[in-house]
Amino acid sequence: MARFYRRKKTGTSIAEAAASMVLMIPLIILLTFVIWEVSYTCFLINNLSQASRLAARSMAISYGADPKIVDSRAAQDSIVFDQIRIPNIVNDSAQFDDPVFQTTTEPHTVRIKVRYLGGQHSLPPFPHPDPLNLQSRFQPVAESTFRLE
């Protein structure tokens, strides 16, 4: 009658656990970083959308009071863009592109675009850290259109 002996395989299980941790820990860290950056991107775009909607609405109301605002970026800045600030997201009127007034066809509208310019206007860089150098190719932008009053 043959006897089978069980050998303890503690050394093997420790080596397998270490090998799996070497693979899993970097993946977990990478996944955490990606989730954080995607969440922050959604946060930025949501706040930029709010700023563009406020600017478009204010510009439409200002146009109703004085249609000459179409021709003056200085007036647009002082009446509308300088009033819209979201800390660390919209810090400067230069983040707003020139508004596009559509007055030749009905309905008359104004379209406003705002950009997150990371690293400029005292804004934190985005993404940060940037190991893939995405900042040069990726810029969160929001645009809104509002009917002129």
Image: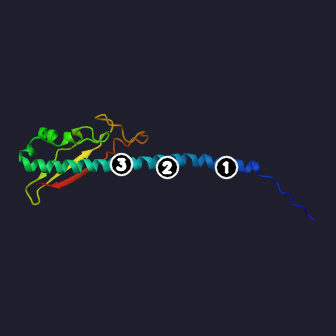
Measured as percent of width and height from the top left, residue 124 is found at 35, 37
Which residue is outermost to the right?
A: 1
Query: Which label's residue is closer to the chain start, 1 or 3?
Result: 1
Task: Classify residue 1 as left or right of residue 64.
Answer: right
Query: Which label's residue is closer to the chain start, 2 or 1?
Result: 1
Q: Which mark is residue 43?
A: 3
Q: Label 2 vs label 1: CA separation?
A: 20 Å
- Indicate the amino acid at tag 3: Phe
Query: Which label's residue is closer to the chain start, 3 or 2?
Result: 2
Figure quadrant of residue 79: top left
Check if mark 3's residue and mark 2's residue have beta carbons within 8 Å: no
Sort mark 3 into few (<14), some (14-19) or many (20+) by Cα contacts within 10 Å: few
Q: Mark 1 falls on what kind of element? A: helix
Check if mark 1's residue and mark 3's residue have beta carbons within 8 Å: no
Q: Which mark is residue 31?
A: 2
- Indicate the amino acid at tag 1: Ala
Which residue is outermost to the top?
A: 122
Q: Mark 2 falls on what kind of element? A: helix
Residue mark closest to the camera, 3 vs 2:
3
Quadrant holding the N terminus: bottom right
Q: Which mark is residue 17?
A: 1
Which residue is outermost to the bottom?
A: 1
